[in-house]
Image: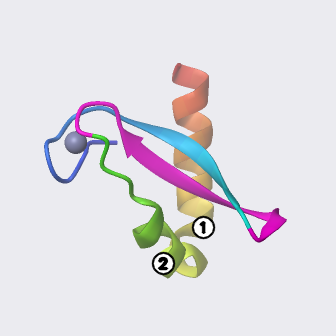
């Protein structure tokens, strides 16, 4: 996963909704510039959920 802004290394994070701790969002943060991809994931979560889950899982195994 490359950062769309600087092509730096991105890591997956789980963001908690401050109003509802039950909800959480998988997001990507760029280690280089701090770019956060949570909005994009939230908008397309229904479409790419399974693909994104696979990517996060693979990334964590690699790390
Ligand atoms: Zn970046």
Q: Residue furthest right?
A: 22
Nearer to the camera, 57 or 4: 4
N-term-proximal mark, 2 vs 1: 2
Q: Is residue 8 left or right of residue 30?
A: left
x, y (%) of residue 53? 62, 53
Say how the picture is coloured: rainbow
Q: Nearer the viewer, residue 14 or 49?
A: 14
Chief SS of the magenta region = strand
Image region (quadrant) for ligand 1: top left
Is residue 32 found left or right of 36 in the rendered image?
Answer: left
Q: Secondary structure at mark 1?
A: helix
Image point 62% across, 39% down: which residue? 57
> Which residues lie in the magenta part?
19-33
Give the number of callouts.
Answer: 2
Query: Left or right: where does residue 19 sit relative to residue 38?
Result: right
- The residue indicated by pointer 1 is 49
- Where's residue 19, x and y in %? 76, 71
Q: Is mark 2 within 8 Å of ligand 1?
A: no
Please, which residue is most extreme toward the left here?
A: 6
The span from disc 2 to disc 1 (Cα, nearest Å) is 8 Å
Q: Position of residue 15 (x, y in %)?
A: 63, 53
Q: Quadrant of the N terminus?
A: top left
Give the residue displayed 52% in from the left and 33% down from the top.
59
* Disc 1 crowd, CA 10 A, few/some/many (<14, 14-19, 20+): some
For disc 2, the neighbor class at 10 Å (few under 14, some 14 to 19, many from 20) is: few
Q: Residue furthest front?
A: 19
Which residue is found at the position 56% from the left and 74% from the top?
A: 45
Identify residue for label 2. Answer: 44
Is 49 situated left or right of 35 in this image?
Answer: right
| Residue 58's disc number | none
Q: What is the secondary structure assignment of the residue under circle 2?
A: helix
Q: Residue at x 17, y 40 (%)?
A: 7
């Amino acid at each position: 996963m490359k950062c769309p802004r600087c092509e730096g290394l991105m890591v997956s994070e789980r963001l908690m909704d401050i109003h509802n701790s039950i909800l959480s969002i998988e997001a990507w943060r760029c280690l280089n510039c701090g770019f956060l991809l949570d909005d994009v994931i939230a908008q397309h979560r229904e479409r790419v959920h399974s693909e994104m889950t696979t990517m996060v899982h693979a990334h964590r195994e690699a790390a």
